[in-house]
Amino acid sequence: MAEKVNKDEILINILKIIAPGTKFREGLDNILKAKTGALIIIGDSKEIMDIVDGGFKIDEEYTPARLYELAKMDGAIILSKDLKRILLANTQIIPSSKITTEETGTRHRTAERTAKQTGELVISISQRRNIITVFKGDFRYTIEDSSKIITKANQALQTLENYKKVFDSKLSVLNEYEFNDIVTLDNVITCIQRAEMVMKVAKEVQRSIYELGEDGILVKMQLEELIEDLPEEELLIIKDYIAPSRRLVAEKVLQTIKTSSQDEFVQSQIIARALGYEQFDNYEEVAVYPRGYRILNKIPRMPSNIVTNLVKTFKSFQHILLADVDKLDEVEGIGEVRARTIKQSLRRMQEQFVFDNLMI
């Protein structure tokens, strides 16, 4: 799983470097249009320079036009790590032939071997197929045309919207059940599972946004509108329902769930175990009791330290809900005015949640 996370980080960093709208991508696109092909290495580490043969020194400021002109020659181009300077051009790269490669073309075989041997970012532009392929270490990724990426992103957004509707319906049920004190562990697990399904699709859309660069502004706006405060909502659900007998940190529990595979997080026992619960035959029969973090955070202008004080004082949401104004007033930092606001806000929320479920 750590390897998968590392690959995701590598890809995101690469996509940011070569995203449309950057000067570097402009140079790559010019090479694509000219159909000249190119082999570009980013970085001049000792590992790179040890396998460089011939060519000539440039050491000039990077511009898209310069990159395009130098790509007309057959040799590789070496850029500085920060992409600000073109260092060498028309060089021959001689990586170890013992390094395995599954590529077919000479340029791509050299690129893959160089990336594996040096760990640097290497970009190969195919003259025949006219595509950009990036290599870094053992990682390989082919850059697709923007129109294809946008189509794929829009399809993912539709899936995301459907998943979000299901999550909202499950959350609406949880809202009402918390006020009625009838929440089961199954309700909690289902909400977390649905939240993770939304976030996994959102991650794919975010990858497309990185890949689209300035062309992905509309997709980014749609994603932000769909996700809204879902990550915070999921974290607060976890904070509310960590097993009372366990001293677990909500952020670490969430990370454990997020690093689970697709097959794992759809299994109820995996989520239950992450929350600190034992394995049960039927989670629908296991009653659980929220602490109140999530609902209290919905009250306007409610400082987080006040929420914490309330939870520490009353221990559970039901005790907070049943407390009168005088009892609430006794909590540090509240006062009579805020105590009345809390009571009124909770009453309005309860009425709204009942109405919302009637409309589903």
Image (cartoon, helix red, strand yellow):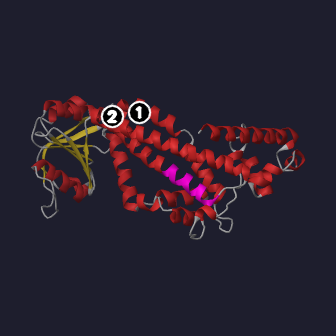
Query: Magenta region, mostly helix, strand or loop?
Result: helix
Residue 29 in sight: yes
Q: Is 137 on the left-hand or right-hand side of 308?
A: left
In the picture as drawn, the residue positioned furthest to the right comes out as 326
Which is more toward the observer, 227 or 252? 227
Decide: is 149 above or below 332.
above
Q: Residue tagged by mark 1?
A: 219
Marks 1/2 in contact by CB < 8 Å: the verdict is: yes
Q: How many marks?
A: 2
Find residue 302 and report its image quarter: top right
Residue, x 76% and y 47% (percent of image)?
306
Image coords of residue 197 (percent x, y): 46, 50
C-alpha span from label 1 to label 2: 8 Å
Decide: is 148 above or below 197.
above
The C terminus is located in which quarter? top right
Segment colored magenta: 184-196
Q: Secondary structure at mark 1?
A: helix
Residue, x 19% and y 54% (percent of image)?
112
Q: Is 99 on the left-hand or right-hand side of 286?
A: left
Q: Residue tagged by mark 2?
A: 150
Which is more toward the observer, 277 or 217? 277
Which is more toward the observer, 21 or 62? 21
Image coords of residue 214 (percent x, y): 37, 30
**Magenta-span inclusion, residue 268:** no
Residue, x 47% and y 46% (percent of image)?
198
Image coords of residue 355 (percent x, y): 67, 37
Image coords of residue 342 (percent x, y): 79, 42
Amino acid type for the residue under numbered disc 2: Ile
Residue 299 in sight: no
